[in-house]
Image: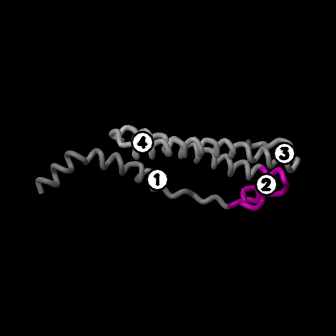
Amino acid sequence: MKKAIAFTKEFGISILSLALPVLASAQIPVPVPPTPSTAPGAQINSVQSVLNIVCVVFSWLFYFLVALTVIFIVLAAFKYLFAGGDAEKVKAAGSMLLYAAVAVGVALLARAIPLVIANFLGAGTLSTC
């Protein structure tokens, strides 16, 4: 019993602070019925709308790859720090940095591909890019 009280005194505020966001999200949202303008298929009615959807998808891909690049760079830095002079670990960290550079290149392509597709299809400008 004394261990439980000591544990509660030591970690009680931390556990409570972790539980508060869960309690705040316990509210039941009121569902909104879909209208014709918000239905999934209602937005696709021209080539321009298809290109806008492609642009949104590639925009999400861009942000995902940027986040992945940051994670790879941080992991490579930790590998360099903890390599301890081991050439194999240093080589692995260097290859991780190379993968991060490739991810940056792919992310930049993800920003350029919708514009290339729009130019190819002759759609002019994209509203969401």
* Upstream in sequence: badge 4 or badge 1: 1
User: Which kind of residue does numbered mark 3 sit on?
Assistant: Asn
Residue hosting label 4: 90
Residue beneath disc 3: 119
Could you tell me what secondary structure mostly forms the magenta stretch? loop
Answer few, some or many: residues within 10 Å of disc 1's Cα (few below 14, many 20 plus, some between 14 and 19): few
* Amino acid on which the number 2 mark rests in the picture: Val
Q: Secondary structure at mark 1?
A: loop
Q: Residue furthest front?
A: 87
Magenta part of the chain? 34-51
Q: Give the Cα distance between marks 3 and 1.
A: 44 Å
Q: Nearer the viewer, mark 2 or mark 3?
A: 3
| Amino acid on which disc 4 is placed | Val
**Location of mark 2 (residue):** 50
Upstream in sequence: badge 1 or badge 2: 1
Inspect the image, locate mark 1, and give the three-letter code of the amino acid beneath it: Ser
* Outermost residue to the right: 122
Query: Which disc, if any, is residue 25?
Result: 1
